Structures are given as structure tokens and as C-alpha cells.
Image (tube, rainbow, N blue to C red):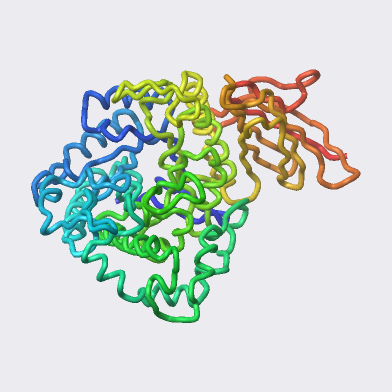
Amino acid sequence: MKDLPEIKKRNGGHCFWLEGHPFIMLAAETHNSACASREYMQQVWSKVKELNCNTLLAPVYWEWIEPQENQFDFDLAEQLIIEARKNRMKLVLLWFGSWKNGLSTYAPTWVKTDGQRFSRTEDEHGRRTKILSMFGSEVLAAEQNAFRNFMQYIKVFDAEEQTVLAVQIENEVGILGAARDFSVGAEAEYKKDIPNSLAKHIKNCNLCGTEAEDSEGMETVKNGESSKAFLSEADTNRIGGSWEKVFKEKAEEVFMAWHYAGYINELAKCGKECYALPMFTNVWLKSHALEKAGVYPSGGPVPEMLDIWKLGAPSLDILAPDIYTFDFAGAADSYARADNPLFVPETRRDKWAAANLYLAVGRYHTLCYSPFGAESIGEDHSFITGRIHTDSKDKNVSSPAVKEYLAQSYRLLGNMLPVITGHYGDGKMTGFVQGRSEKEKQLELGGCRLTIQFYHSVNDDDEFLPAAGIIIQAGEYEWIFAGYGYRACLDAAESGKQLDFLALEKGHYDEKANWIKDMDLNGDEQQVQMEEKPTAVRAWYYEF
């Protein structure tokens, strides 16, 4: 069997490795119900090909895979793999199991209807909910059995072709409507002291007040900076104690995070025993800093809980944020860590979709970038519901320009993959996106100062898409610029020295990553001035 897809350290950073080469998933994710219809999926494949995606993120449903206990049907997964191969595309399969967006809507009927074996969470008033409980329940054993059989099937059907690159376990896990589960089983666990492994980790200050060593060349790889606020206040003088004594007002959320992490870790372990693909779980982020646990799924791997999850789920390769916030960089800062490469399984499909791609790849060295609702990109409505989106601030609003820019960007960066991944982690590449009302920005790279000037202002009501780019120092005096909507001026960092052009070329990369020069630029055009649409420029300088 060929070497499996894997995540490797490279230049102090991370790369996704496929068939002996680094790879970036330039992707899109389908709507949740898309895979329930073969006919519907035909238009999905067509639209994803138009986007120049190399990977599709698509869900598989526990309720379909195991409609009766111990009776398995893998037709859904098989059809996805077959169609992906026909369309020369890779897959990331999303296991919608016990929890999806904090609820349990994808559990099989035989699980939902057997409250004796599969208990439900309760709120603080003793009201039962629709959400499956981890405590006093057989749900983990049942789901392990299903997931183990699923991964074994993927191995048998796909190990040679390696169409499936990775598997997401659950979707935006956590409990909604309460900070924790108050069922009888949960109460019994909550009254116990925190586990010794967690207590010792805090005692050793591995969680509190320290940073992991930054990955060489990464601009913003910090170890759980947002975790420190409450973890630094944890009672590290004791090696034991109750959840509330140690974690105080965050106790309920930490309790749920620890147990969700442990549950998903058990799924990842049993899945990898069958077929050791990279595995991750995704994150429903807070909408603002003061939002309370339970409004967002409590216990999920939000930034404050990252270190809890890293300790509790070592078999997971990645904790992956779904980034719908306008502050893409703020979210990426929390998750692009020395122990956690950035992987974006869901993000906006509005005017920021193409722009944030350049930031994710160039600055944060993402392994995957995937706007949500693949078949609705470039449309102002949902293809499944037909509902029109009219709020310009709605993450679902899209337009033909979004599809055009994203497709052209995927083609541009897709052909550049060997060039780009060669600089993952080496400190010689950066990416940027134009902020609201921003006219220019200053960057530093390779001992040079770069002034980035934007052609148009960008606000919610503007017709223009935000400008964005990637800049690579390819040699001592050689630079590569990719993107759109900006001009770049380089100055020597050392005072008293100046830079001037030796040569300037506009061009593109072919499918084998060879540079194809389209035009020499000189005279009035001797400047790094990108087009309105995605393009590439190479520049050679000398210093005097």
C-alpha cells in the first residue's frame, strides 16, 4: 500500500503530504443535505469543478450508514468516492455522528428512540433535551462500532486510490442551551475531582502562563494565548480538587470540553486502528468574547479550550475553526499553533471568500481552505431551500464576482502549489487581505519594507471585493507577487540603500508549476501593479 496522506513538519511548520508531495486542499464544502441525493450531487460536482477546487468536503451520515444496529450500508460513501474520482478530485469526509452543531440530528433512529441505552442531556432545571449524553450511556460503544466499520470500509475501497484524504469526526461538537449536562450520569462525574492527568498538566504550567516554541518562520503561531486568561487563574497549588475549585467560573465548560475531547479521542483511536488517515474536529466559534457557553456549543474546542482538547484528544491531528467572523486573522491566530496547523473546513462564501484565501495560505500556511455551501458560491440564494439572502452582512450572500475571483484564485494558487508549499514555514512568504476602509498597509519580509496600496476602498456596501495577495521572497533579490487589487513598493530595510528593477515580468504558472512569462514590464509599467483580477508578477531587484 502507498504511504498514507499525513501531516509532516517542514521548515519548522506543517505541510499536508500526499503521494510524496506537499499539498494544499483548495476546497469547498457542500450543504449538509446535499449528499442525500445523487441527482442533486451532480450539480454540486459541476459547480465545484467550475471553482477549480482540488478537494470537496462532504458529509456522511451515521443514520444512513447504520440504519439498523450492526447492519451497515456504505453506498453513500462509495458513490462520493466514485464521483470524486470521475471528477479528478480529492475528498474529506465529514462524519456526522452523535453530534452536529451541538445537536444529535444525525444519530440513527434506533439510537434516538432508545432512551434507556442512549440517555439525553438535561439542563439545570432537569428538563431532558434532544442532545445525546456522553454520561451513563452506551452511545460511545455504539458509535465506535459504526466508525470502526466505516473506516475499515474506506480502507478496503480506497487505500490504493487515496481519494479520501482526511476525516472530520462529528461537527461543531458541544452542548447547546446550557453550560453543561445536568443528567444523573453527568452530575456523578462532575462531583468527582478533576483527573490527575489534567491536574498534573496544570501543575507543571504546561497550560498556564507558558507559550509553546513558535514554529520557525510562522508569523503568528502562539500556544493558546487566549487559553491563559482563565487557566492562569486555575488553582495550580493542588494536585487534585473539584472542577469548580480548580477552574472556578469556567468549570462547567472545561468539564464538558474534557469529556467531549475524550469521547472524540476514542473515536479517532479506533478509526486509526483500521485506517490511519489524518483526523480532525471542527469548531463553532464564539460570535463575541462575552458570549456565554451554551449559546455557542459548550465544551467545543473554542480558543479558551484548546489546551484542554490538546491534552484530552491526542489522537486528533487538528482542531479546525469554522471561520465566519469578519476577523479572520484573529481566529487564525488562535489556531495556527506549533502543535496545531491551520485547517479551515468552513468559511464565508461572500465577498471575503477569495480574499481570505490569500491570508490563510500566505500568512498562516493553511492545510485546507473551504468556503461553505459549494453549490451556492456565486449565487444569492441557497440551492436546497431556494431562500434568497438579502442582508449584505450575511455570510451566505454571494455573487457571480465571488465565484469568478475564487475560481481564478484557486487556479492561480493551485498551479503554484509546489512554489507556495516550498516556503511553508521558512519565513520568506506572507499573505494579506485589505481591511474595511483600508487604503494601504506596511509589511516587512526578507529585510525589505513593503508598502501595499489598494486601488479601491472596501466597505459593506461597496461593489468591490477586498484586495488580497501573497508575496514570496524567492531569492535574495527575486520576488513573486500573486493576487489582485493592489500595487506594491519595496524599499531596502537598511538606511542609505535603494532598490531598482533588473527585470519585471507578468505571467502565470502552468499545471506543472512552470513559470510562463506573458509580458516584460518596463517604462510606464515598470512597477508591481497587480490587475483587478487574480494574476502573478515576478520581479528582480538590485541594491545600490
**How many numbered badges does the structure rendering display?**
0
Residue 312 image offset from top left, x and y in percent: 37, 65
Residue 210 or residue 406, whichever sits in front:
210
Residue 492 image offset from top left, x and y in percent: 82, 42
Q: Is residue 453 above or below residue 147?
A: above
Seen as rendered, the residue at the extreme right is: 496
Question: Which residue appears at 27% of the width and 56% of the height?
Answer: 123
Q: Quadrant of residue 222?
A: bottom right
Question: Which residue appears at 60% of the width and 25% of the height?
Answer: 535
Residue 39 or residue 460, whichever sits in front:
460
Residue 43 image offset from top left, x and y in percent: 30, 22
Q: Quadrant of residue 540?
A: top right
Q: Is residue 297 above or below residue 189?
A: above
Residue 526 or residue 61, whichever sits in front:
61
Q: Is residue 252 above or below residue 406?
A: below
Seen as rendered, the residue at the extreme front is: 125
As drawn, is 319 to the left or to the right of 356? left
As drawn, is 112 to the left or to the right of 520? left
Question: Which residue appears at 35% of the width and 47% of the height?
Answer: 172
Residue 428 image offset from top left, x and y in percent: 65, 46
Q: Is residue 18 visible?
A: yes
Question: Which residue appears at 36% of the width and 65% of the height?
Answer: 255
As drawn, is 260 to the left or to the right of 528? left
Quarter of the image containing the C terminus? top right
Residue 437 or residue 493, whichever sits in front:
437
Q: Is residue 24 visible?
A: no
